[in-house]
Amino acid sequence: MMWGYFNNWGWGGGMMIFMLFFWVAIVWLIIFLMKENTNSSGSKNDNKTALDILQERYTRSEIDKKEYEEKLKVINKNN
């Protein structure tokens, strides 16, 4: 006896709906994590000016004093 086997709202239909929600949740989670990852890395320089970034790069020794002064002149000329 197979009661409810061919019923769309028995285990067959319920499992189909569960799997649909499961895969929608997985896709949503992947999109959410990707969006959070890009937001966290992209928002570091959102409110910084060019001068702030230049000073940070000089402080971290990414650029030398000569390059810092050249870029500072360019920034001051543009402002």
Image: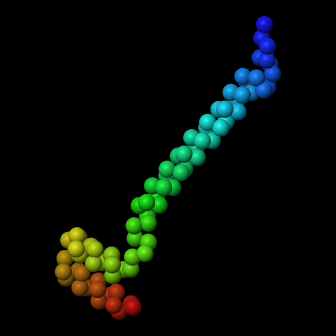
Relative depth, front residue between 78 and 31: 31
Q: Residue at x 67, y 36 (%)?
A: 20
Image-based side of 70 in relation to 33, left or right: left
Residue 35, image x, y percentages: 51, 55
Residue 47, image x, y percentages: 43, 75
Q: Residue at x 79, y 25 (%)?
A: 8
Residue 36, image x, y percentages: 48, 55
Relative depth, front residue between 68 and 31: 31
Q: Residue at x 22, y 74 (%)?
A: 59
Can residue 51 be seen from the camera position used here? yes
Compared with residue 24, is residue 69 higher up or lower down, i.e. above or below? below
Residue 28, image x, y percentages: 58, 46
Image-based side of 20 in relation to 78, left or right: right
Can residue 63 be seen from the camera position used here? no
Image-based side of 10 in relation to 67, left or right: right
Relative depth, front residue between 1 and 74: 1
Image-based side of 11 in relation to 69, left or right: right
Quarter of the figure with the C terminus: bottom left
Quarter of the figure with the N terminus: top right
Pick out the residue farthest to the top. 1
Residue 52, image quadrant:
bottom left
